[in-house]
Amino acid sequence: MFKKVLVANRGEIAVRIIRACRDLGLRTVAVYSEVDKEAPHVHLADEAHLIGGAQEAKSYLDMAALMRAVTDSGADAIHPGYGFLSENHRFAEVCRAWGITFIGPDPGAIEEMGVKARAKERMRAAGVPVAPGSDGTLRDPSEAAEVARRIGYPVLVKASAGGGGRGIRVVHDEQELAQAMERAAAEAQAYFGDGQLYLEKYLPDPRHIEIQVLADAHGRVASLGERESSMQRRRQKILEEAPAVPVDAALRRRMGEAAAKAAAAVGYKSAGTVEFLLDRDGSFYFMEMNTRVQVEHPCTELVTGVDIVAEQLRVAMGEPLDLPEAVEPSGWAVECRVNAEDPERNFLPCPGTITAYEAPGGPWVRVDSGVSAGSVVSPFYDSLLAKVITWGRDRTQALDRMRRALQEFRVEGITTTIPLHLKLLEDPDFRRGEYHINFLEQRFGQP
């Protein structure tokens, strides 16, 4: 058991975690950088501690500063949220060494799934479908060329330690291979400190389907069904929904079983998401496992009635999952990410001060936000301001409620992605559910 949780994050996810803690009667500690001193999560927590300067390396990524805040506050647990140190196995190990509960999986599971090439081999051994490709990381371009000739072009060159779409290149023939590897390795080294690469078959216009899992320390792994995250730019998700249009009950069961196998293979305990690519013929292949709570988890919460963050907290306290034997979706949920970006200028980040802010409301509308009127949107952090999530008895109703909610959403002083979402909601192909991971680029010319 623990009584006080330090939330090692900021923005909307920090607010979300603090609220879940309050529901369970747990006290909370916020941490903040110099530019976040007036942020909503700081005022919502029971106490707050300054941990450093604006740059994330000097605040939210500074393990020493975070552990000082633990000592000063007397917190006995840490929730990392998503991003920052949430998938850093060394941070989880530091928490364990300090006798602090890390609200997430064991360090070994984080490390195992964090190295994508290694995770892929582990999944293949566990019977989880994986795309054809290299066995482990590549030694050099000649080995990559041999693998590509065997599985056929086009292929994907991918960073083994990657994430967020970084360190990935599509290669259409052997002449492009060496240069693509060089660029992907350089990008991976810059972002992840690891330039190792692997190769897999490229699927044209697949759909990105992910399965939400929860696992406890008593041997249970539960699947909460799927979400679709195919609406992307540069492999960064923009809009998500649950359930997914192309997934019927039989496919949901098969994907859920595969996700449960993936989690069990690494002794997983906590909330996690197993991501798959779904081909047009109904085949699906393991991409990666996110060993943390996902940005889009509210979609699953609205169609299942399960508080995923609260279950994370309960699992971390050693309690069994409080879920029915089978969790089936009810209705439909859609989530739009409202970012401080200008879609008309290649999604250029738009930092500044929010001069006016009025979030939408009404029946079946949820807004998870980390800002308010007067908030300073810093260039140092992710551009996500808020998430709007709507529920309907069917997909059409959920989309119509989303349109109404976004039309009500007032954010002034900065440019946001709300106009793009409204445009998407009117697109006839999207309305029919006929889209894929390259849809945004092909339809609107957005890279």
Image (cartoon, rainbow, N blue to C red):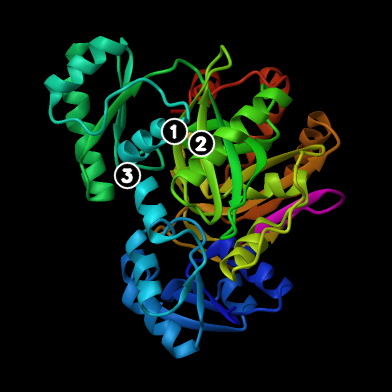
Instruction: Find residue 199 and name its label.
Output: none
Residue assigned mark 2 = 275
User: Which region shows up in magenta?
Assistant: 359-373
What's under tag 1, amino acid-wise? Met
The answer to which of marks 1 and 3 sits earlier in the sequence is 3
**Direction front: furthest residue:** 219
Residue assigned mark 3 = 115
Secondary-structure class at tag 1 = strand
Q: Is residue 108 visible?
A: yes
Q: CA distance from mark 1 to mark 3?
A: 12 Å
Q: Nearer the viewer, residue 178 or 144?
A: 144
Q: Residue at x 58, y 42 (%)?
A: 417
Residue 91: name its quadrant: bottom left
Marks 1 and 3 in Cβ contact (< 8 Å)? no
Q: Main secondary structure of the magenta part?
A: loop
Above or below, comparing residue 104 to residue 133 in the picture: below
Quarter of the picture containing the C terminus is top left
What's under tag 2, amino acid-wise? Glu
Residue 407 x %, y %: 75, 43
Residue 431 x %, y %: 72, 23
Could you tell me how many numbered marks the image carries? 3
Few, some or many C-alpha atoms within 10 Å of disc 2 (few <14, some 14-19, many ≥20)?
A: many
Q: Nearer the viewer, residue 394 or 152?
A: 152
Secondary-structure class at tag 3 = loop
Magenta span includes 361 = yes
Residue assigned mark 1 = 287
Marks 2 and 1 in Cβ contact (< 8 Å)? yes
Above or below, comparing residue 428 to residue 123 in the picture: above
